[in-house]
Image: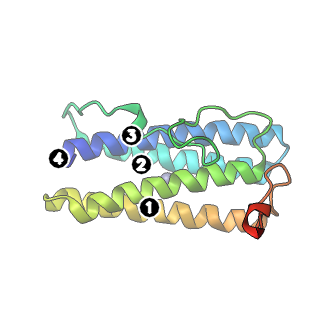
Amino acid sequence: MHSLAELLAHALAMEVEAAERYEALAEQMNVHNNPPLAELFTSLARVERLHAAQIRARAGAASLPHIPAWEYRWRDPEGPETAPFDVVDHRTTPQRALAIALHNERRAETFFTGIEHTAADAQVRALAAELAEEEREHVRLVERWLARYPADPDTPAEDPDPPLAQG
Ligand code: ZN
């Protein structure tokens, strides 16, 4: 990684993926009769689509290299580390939707920050810094929403004092 074309290809794939996931989450929040969260996810989908368009514009006519899906696909924080996130269904509660969003926004932020700190090319570093900052904003936004929702009753919090630790 680390040519400008590679960064653009990766960024584009991540933004398109995020937009699609947010659209699915928005739909699911409508099913849950939660218009505020449906609106949040719809607006995040719009922002990610806008980023994708900006990246495409920046890439110009350059044909971008292919990026393998496992490098950019969303993950389910509760699933196995290797499992891509592709199922949103009736079990996807508001809390869970926000947890999935937070996990994947953090992942994107980490990705771009890594490039910001390691790329040899100054132009690549600058673009990565810009994208990392935008992902940080998404992380903060999702964190604020998550704080408004009580713990998910379907997803028991980690037992602070598991029986195995007692003895
Ligand atoms: Zn984002």
Labels 3, 2: front one: 3
Q: Residues within 10 Å of mark 2 (few under 14, many from 20)?
A: many
Q: Secondary structure at mark 3?
A: helix
**Which residue was labeled with disc 4?**
3
- Say which quarter of the image contains residue 141: bottom right
**Which residue was labeled with disc 2?**
51
Q: Residues within 10 Å of mark 3 (few under 14, many from 20)?
A: few
Q: What is the CA distance from the residue labelled 4 to the residue labelled 3?
A: 16 Å
Whole-percent x and y of residue 122? 15, 62
Q: Secondary structure at mark 4?
A: loop
Q: Amino acid at mark 1?
A: Glu
Q: Secondary structure at mark 1?
A: helix
Whether residues under marks 4 and 3 lie with C-beta atoms below 8 angstroms apart, the answer is: no
Q: Within 8 Å of ligand 1, the CB of disc 2?
A: yes
Q: What is the CA distance from the residue labelled 1 to the residue labelled 2?
A: 10 Å
The mark that comes first in sequence, 3 or 1, is 3
Labels 4, 2: front one: 4
Labels 4, 3: front one: 3
Figure quadrant of the C terminus: bottom right
Q: Tell me, for residue 27, which label it has, or none.
A: none
Whether residues under marks 1 and 2 lie with C-beta atoms below 8 angstroms apart, the answer is: yes
Labels 3, 1: front one: 3
The mark that comes first in sequence, 1 or 2, is 2
**Which residue was labeled with disc 1?**
134
Q: Amino acid at mark 2?
A: His
Q: Secondary structure at mark 2?
A: helix
Whole-percent x and y of residue 16? 46, 38
The mark that comes first in sequence, 3 or 2, is 2
Vertical placement of 133 versus 96: above or below?
A: below
Q: Amino acid at mark 3?
A: Glu
